[in-house]
Image: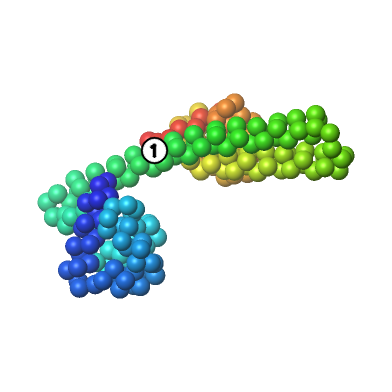
Amino acid sequence: MDQVKIGRFIAECRKNLNLTQMQLAEKLNVTDRAVSKWETGKSMPDSSIMLDLCNILQISVNDLLNGEVVTVDDYNEKLEKSLIEMVKQKEEFDKRLLSLEIVIGVFAVIILLGASMVAAFVPMYAWLRVLIIISGVVICMVGCIYGLRIEQTAGYYMCAKCGHRYVPTFKSVFFAMHINRTRYMRCPKCNEKSWNKKVLSKE
């Protein structure tokens, strides 16, 4: 999606209705700065207010995502392109999230090892040594849980039995045996347990 084109379209529709950025912002319960960012292509309206924005501007969501009023003749084609583009953007976002998971995991382990080394080799009171080790363990655990949460929500797991792709619960991911990002879990569709592989796309 062309954010700059969409931003110009939002500004054009707003002006056609004789609305200021502040007036549009008040109707959507956002700041005029947020509206300004949309119109300059620096950000997109949040999905939670997209329908309200379209209703106020008297356009369809398809119009908004294309940055122009879509005619009846090419409506389906434009809609399909918009959906494909949204899927691609989600896949790219999930890919970045999974990379972040690795960074968080490495960082958490480094902190734990660093705390352990300091506690082991630097002269200090016993209570301080214990405090440093506990702090390292807590930070490492929080980092690992946060990383696992990213892995659970980014992309999908594919059942090795039926090929169904789904987002599992955090509990099932947490307690599942795993090899890297492949986890032994029960598929919600076929109800069979197998080694489910992490994939980015829904299809």
93 lies above or below 56: above
Which secondary structure lies at badge 1? Answer: helix
72 lies above or below 202: below
**Crowd around label 1: few <14 · some 14–19 · many ≥20 (10 Å):** some
Q: Quadrant of residue 102?
A: top right
Colour treatment of the image = rainbow
Point out the residue furthest to the top here.
179
In the image: residue 71, left or right of residue 181: left
Q: Position of residue 94 (x, y in %)?
A: 44, 39
- Residue type, label 1: Glu
Q: Position of residue 123 (x, y in %)?
A: 84, 33
**Whether residue 152 is visible:** no
Q: Which residue is mark 1?
A: 92
Point out the residue furthest to the right here.
126
Q: Position of residue 196 (x, y in %)?
A: 53, 31
**Whether residue 132 is visible:** yes
Q: Nearer the viewer, residue 29 or 75?
A: 29
121 lies above or below 54: above
| Location of the C terminus (image quadrant) | top left
In the image, what residue occupies the spot 27% across and 46% down?
1
In the image, what residue occupies the spot 55% across and 34% down?
103
In the image, what residue occupies the spot 18% across and 51% down?
75
Point out the residue furthest to the front here.
123
In the image: residue 156, left or right of residue 87: right
Q: Position of residue 29 (x, y in %)?
A: 39, 70
Q: Quadrant of residue 149?
A: top right
